[in-house]
Image (tube, rainbow, N blue to C red):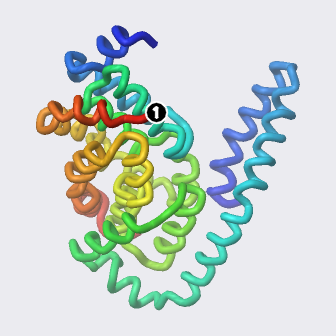
Amino acid sequence: MNLATFTLLIPAVILFAYARRRGDGSHRRGLARGGRTLLSVLPLLLLAFTTIGYVSILLPQEGLQNWMGPDSGWRGLLRAQGMGMLMPGGPYVVLPLISTLYQLGTGLGATITLVTSWSSLSLLNALWEARFIGWRFTVIRWTLLLPFPLLVGLLAEAWFGTTS
Amino acid sequence: MTQEKVAYWLGEGSGWRGIFLACVAGALIPGGPYVYYPIAAALLRAGASLGVLVAFVSAKNVWPVVRLPLEFALLGPRLTVARLLTTFLIPPLLGFLAQALAGRQVEAIRENIKL
């Protein structure tokens, strides 16, 4: 069993056991709801993993390493920040893609910049934010946050080194 | 929640305490943008300050507790720990900066919220 399965198995087993102990059928309802969520996101996941498969086959590994690899420096981090802003979708779609890129050779700092940029500066997310809270808020938050994904990548490389 | 309670805990006068509460709430709240942005908009309308709201959204973005097991599983312990440590100060710092630099914009933002 790999680390990914094991890490996700632990909370699932603990919550199942807790729900069963309540004795009101919540363990069955939880499974049913999880199953419905899985069915509703299945088409999205199939498309996302098809894309990930082709990215890992078609993307020249050497090119990726020059672009965002451990020796790509601050330019690599800047590219990672730009790419993170353009990544659409939630964690179940984007994190497997970032994990594939990481295995193909993006550096530690660039990967952290990528996660931070996608989760906080994603343009799709900015649209949701502007829709609910307004453009003025989005512009303020976005502008203040703009330097941080790059800084976080630099800090991570200084503390933890550049390689995975 | 009543307006007075929101104003006391999360309003202009709540200072670091309000920003800290917003960071914890943002880290713990599950769900996508269609869940937390309406909640954020409602809090702002009820009297939360700009800094508190920026801290809430930033904590949801960089410290999301429900995303951590997946991140840990896919990217491994070293990268997850490095990311958490390097982004640790972002939500409170950003909340504080937003309040100090643009806090007065809050009325204009509040007026334009349509719930």
Tell me what residue is drawn at x 21 percent, y 20 percent: B12
The residue closer to the viewer here, A58 or A111, is: A58
Residue B11 sits in which quadrant? top left
Residue B92 sits in which quadrant? top left
Asked if residue B94 lies left or right of residue A90, the reply is left
Q: Position of residue B61 (x, y in %)?
A: 41, 46
Q: Single out the residue that lies furthest toward the left.
A: B101
Asked if residue A75 lies left or right of residue B65, the reply is left
Tell me what residue is drawn at x 40 percent, y 47 percent: A129
- To which residue does mark 1 refer? B115
Vertical placement of residue B95 versus A97, above or below: above
Tell me what residue is drawn at x 32 percent, y 36 percent: B112
Q: Is residue B66 visible?
A: no
Vertical placement of residue B6 versus A127, above or below: above
Q: Position of residue A54 (x, y in %)?
A: 60, 84
The residue closer to the viewer here, A70 or B63, is: B63
Tell me what residue is drawn at x 78 percent, y 27 percent: A19
Asked if residue A146 lies left or right of residue B75, the reply is left
Q: Position of residue B109 (x, y in %)?
A: 27, 36
Identify the subunit bearing mark 1: B
How many numbered circles are shown? 1
Q: Position of residue A8 (x, y in %)?
A: 66, 48
Amino acid beneath label 1: Leu
Q: Is residue A12 visible?
A: yes
The residue closer to the viewer here, A70 or A119, is: A119
Q: Secondary structure at mark 1?
A: loop
